Amino acid sequence: MSWNTIESDAGVFTQLVRDLGVSGVQFAEIPILDSLQDLTGILYGAIFLFKYDSTDYAKNEPLQGEYDFDYPDSLFFANQTIQNACGTLAVLNTLLSLSNDHQEIKLGETLSNFLSFTSAFKDSELRGESISNSDEIRNVHNSFSSPDPFVMDEASQNSDRPSAEVFHFVSFIEHNGVIYELDGLRPAPIVHRAFRNEKQESSKFSQNIVAVLQQRMGLALNSGGKFSVIAIHRDTIDHLNSLRDQGALTTSDYDFSLAQELTKRDAWSREISFRRQNLYGMVFELTKQIAGNMTENDFAKQLAKAQDNTRNRIQRYHRENNA
């Protein structure tokens, strides 16, 4: 069974790890790097998505930092041995490394058993193969995408057509006081020794993450400059409960923040439900039947009407959810 492509989306990653049995952690879209510092105290790391450039991987050294072939056993690192799973691999490399440092992160039975099974493997490629051969992990991963039933033969037949852009995921975390980059296509973790945090200060960690990513984005401009960042942080509801118990939040502030979080999670749930429904075949057959009884002009009018209705529904949805 193959691995399907899934979207780079905070809601998808959050639900993916929950379906694997993980608790105490969630993901957040980061539109501006400086907003990572808004998560000071609860920030665990960051997932970085960028346009893949094969020439960067042909070099003996990484773009930033240096390889750490003697990395500590407490750091989990697996190579990517299959296609379409680099996002899930980045998430797994991160969570399985962070669980030793953050007691709030509970791996659950599936990943705890997996970590125990692979603990004796120092070979990162063997760990990657173990992920690719895990039915439990693959089934959860694939549940967030539905295969497209249409085969686009023209892409392979037209040699003049430019190939699709390929994007890749890596993660950045702090371990033993320095920033580590976990990239499944690299031979080893990359340590950024220039960014030290000997006192393990949460504010220094968030500043270091921002500085590393700013440098990387500057280097990535030559590859098209397309990238996005997703933060990995403590579960928001757990954090709100902790602040309330400490007396750091009033009841009204707690209720307001909790309502916002529940609204966001409800929107995530609806979006994920839509992703899991494969209606292409039904829509295609209905379209053929409708179009068969229309002139080209009639069909064009109906198509324009449908497009207008769709735009109106999208606008109404955003107005209702942003009110």
Image: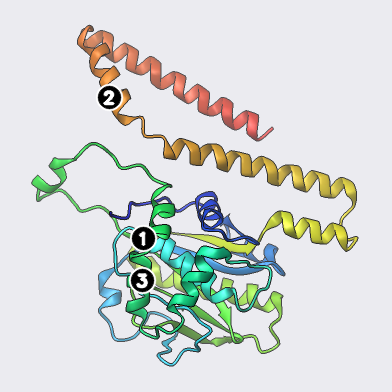
Q: What coloring was used for the rendering?
A: rainbow
Tag 2 and tag 1, C-beta contact below 8 Å: no
Mark 2: which amino acid? Answer: Phe
Q: Position of residue 181 (x, y in %)?
A: 47, 77
Tell me where residue 302 sits by quadrant.
top left
Judging from the image, what secondary structure is the residue with disc 1 in?
loop
- Look at the picture and state if 245 lies above or below 147: below
Q: Quadrant of the C terminus?
A: top right
Q: Mark 3: few, some, or many residues within 10 Å (few <14, many ≥20)?
A: some
User: Mark 3 or mark 2: which is in front?
Assistant: 3
Q: Position of residue 68 (x, y in %)?
A: 43, 89
Mark 3: which amino acid? Answer: Ser
Judging from the image, what secondary structure is the residue with disc 3 in?
helix
Tell me where residue 81 sits by quadrant.
bottom left
Q: Residue at x 63, y 78 (%)?
A: 101
Residue at label 1?
Answer: 85
Q: Position of residue 305 (x, y in %)?
A: 39, 15
Q: Earlier along the polypeptide chain: callout 2 or callout 1?
A: 1
Mark 1: which amino acid? Answer: Ala
Residue at label 3?
Answer: 130
Q: Earlier along the polypeptide chain: callout 3 or callout 2?
A: 3
Return the mark for residue 146: none
Q: Mark 2: few, some, or many residues within 10 Å (few <14, many ≥20)?
A: few
Q: Is residue 30 visible?
A: no
Q: Is residue 77 left or right of residue 206?
A: left
Return the mark for residue 284: 2
Q: Residue at x 36, y 34 (%)?
A: 278
Q: Is residue 256 left or right of residue 185?
A: right
